[in-house]
Amino acid sequence: MKSGLEGQSKDAVHRPDSREAILPAESVRGMRRRDFVRVFMAATVAPAAFLGQTAPPPRPELPAAAPVPWMRGINRATPVPEGAAAETVAEAEVQFFTSTQMATLSRLSDVFLPRIGTTPGALEAGTPAFLDFFVGESPQARKTMYQDGLDWLDTESKKQFAKPFAELETAQADRLLKPWLRTWMTDHLPREPHAAFINTAHSDIRMATVNSRAWGEAPDTAGRQPTQKGLYWSQIEPDMCWSHPGANQHAAAPR
Amino acid sequence: MAKEIVDVLIVGSGHSGGMAAKVLTEKGLSCLILNAGPIVDASKDTEVKPAYDLPYRGFVPPGRVPHVFQANEFDANVWVDEKEVPYTYDPAHPYNWVRVRLFGGRSLFWSRQSFRLSDYELKGKSHDGFGEDWPISLADLSPYYSKVEGIFRVEGSNEGLPQYPNGNLIIDDSPWSGSMARFKAAGASLQIPIAKQRRALGKDGLASSVNLLLPDAFATGKLKAVPNVVVRELSTDKNTGLVNGAHFIDRLSRREMSVKARVVVLAAGCLESTRLLLNSKLANSSGVMGHYLMDQMYGSGLVCSVPEARGGKGTPELMGGSAIVPRFRNLGTKAPNFIRGYALNVTSQRGPMAPRNFAAYGEELQKKLDLYHGSGFMITLMGEVLGHYENHVRINKDVVDAWGIPVLDVQTKYGDNEFNMARDAVDTSIEMVEKAGFEVLSKNYDPNPPGYSIHEVGTCRMGDDPKRSVLNKWNQSHDIKNLFVVDGSSFVSAGWQNPTITLSALAMRASEYLAEQMRQRSIG
């Protein structure tokens, strides 16, 4: 049923940067020379299937150091360079909110989630800039809710305190925000317009902050909500044609 | 070049397709599985990461899977992309169609709750006059349930209740935590029984087609499985009217191909099997195909706190464990404004509380989170949705998927029976937790949109009358004797129970019947 060759070519689709060993170490060590030679020859028959593969051979059978066919130089033994996240070295550019909206959102973020003890707050987590990106990428309903909600907060602030929301004391902000706080269950945010915005923004600001690098790398304290950590799924064999402009036309031919 | 004709073509590789493949290959029949998505290899497709290493800090990438409320950024790539395979609905009545096309389908991700239907569901019409009885009873299904429970290693308790039939279980006789014992006593004072959860232990933390069913099928040497092929339509023999194979398209290259088979078994999931039959214009002489779409109503419930567990006193003796409150309405008595019933999922939890349970922010919220940590007690609803002819799916000829296949238009909504049931469930839950002395922090009466439970059933229902049903009691088409549909689309009523164990038992039963018919040469 399943020949050794099939087993090899399946392994060959492993990305070279995969942390998983392509072959268990034991099986590499235990691989008899004859087997290795067969696999190696199979690779020359079907080079495409062998790209990126590359179990290092058992010791005495090391192939010649050079020349190696030009597309087979990089292999599992090649060191993987260490990458850094852009946000660790760069500032995000504000693209979506106006400067007034951004100032309101920053003050709101600080009121909702200030630094508490050793746990960083929303501002240190870069949450306002993240939300500018996230909301700016979002469907229109979320964009409108944020834009209208931030504008409304600023207007109310000017009406009640004669200054922009961004300049309010916390006690003043409390008077605008607290009447709209609700408890709610997952997927069922309150529906009243201001309550919908206030509770959504609170939830988003918390999640963006708790899941930030600053929060995740701060010392753990009792009762602190943990940064989400989970099994991330890559795209699995993504559709090659779909992102292509002609894809739909190509596929839509009725039988 | 002529290819050998396989005995049975199976479309789909989830629990129903996997079960069909296991039973049929073990009876010596050659099978071919076609699956619309790729094979998963967790060692290369997954990696543990913190949310801050993802572009959206754990938020679902905007616009990707707006109807998958369950999705987050970690798993956004496992769900069917709604742009790649769209579906349509009336904007006033949204539908959440939650799909996985990976090899193994949704069996890779299910919650593993494993319940039998009772004759209150299988013979619902006889009990209350609504809908139709199934053409089979619990006695017919019981031997298959037992075998399926054995394969899935279902753990739970046997309570001897007619509405909650005993099973072939690994008995859970662990003691109740203090909070659960108080809840159970509160239930007893209202004549509401409370039982241990029933859950498939499976193997290595998974109870999927790919680890419990398909390995046995592959071991026979009789199964071939092709990933990444999307079936466009079934083909028929013009002389006999029987199905004789399928046309499909390579998901990645768009190459069109076809394959021949003596028998076709559809197991693509309720709505995909129905879509394939509607697009093939087959097996619908009754006109009921696509109708009677049902699922379970989820989303309503409560979050509570156990006062004695606050301030760090939520010990393992007091907190923890889960329970099921099996249906208790409309058995001996009659509820005033709804028929059928619901179950409640109950969880006692020692971990952090979600911030949304407190109308507070900043330091005030943190103090609440600290105080309430480890005192959570949650109840959520699983309610039976009634099967109405009006709740249906049909082909939308104006919209096609990435492979040019016309998509489904879903026309369904919940009615008064569902909304009244949800209200009763939440009010009754409040009554129970207040008797138990717990504090209600949040509650929600509104169900999630239809489809959310990922338990869609009913669009090719079974029955004895070919004018009123698509399939007979063996999951076999009334119209085309070598066509079987073994997924949840055969359901006549939804019940409150997760459908997996029932559809697996039905797939096993149908496959044994099919194998016997093929042995006798009356099919294929």
Image: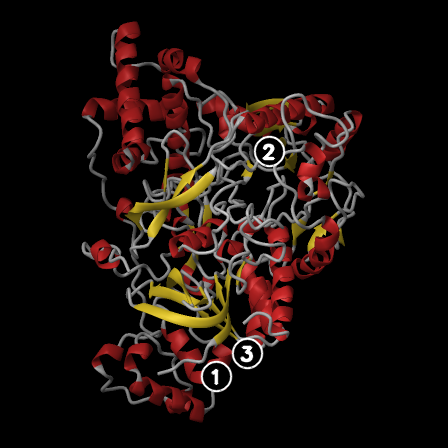
Residue under label 3: B221
Q: Nearer the viewer, mark 2 or mark 3?
A: 3
How many numbered marks does the figure carry? 3
- Tell me the distance, in whole angstroms, between the alpha carbons under discs 3 and 1: 30 Å
Point out residue B12 in the picture as x, y percentages from the top left corner: 48, 60
- How dense is the environment of label 1, judged by Cα within 10 Å: few (below 14), some, or many (20 and up)? some
Name the residue at the front extreme. B239
Closest to the observer: B273 or B115? B273
Closest to the observer: B222 or A203? B222
Q: Residue at x 49, y 29 (%)?
A: B355
Point out residue B464 in the picture as x, y percentages from the top left corner: 63, 50
- How dense is the environment of label 2, judged by Cα within 10 Å: few (below 14), some, or many (20 and up)? many
B488 horizontally vs B428: left or right:
left
Q: Residue at x 61, y 25 (%)?
A: B426
Three-letter amino acid code at disc 3?
Gly
Residue under label 1: A29
Residue under label 2: B380
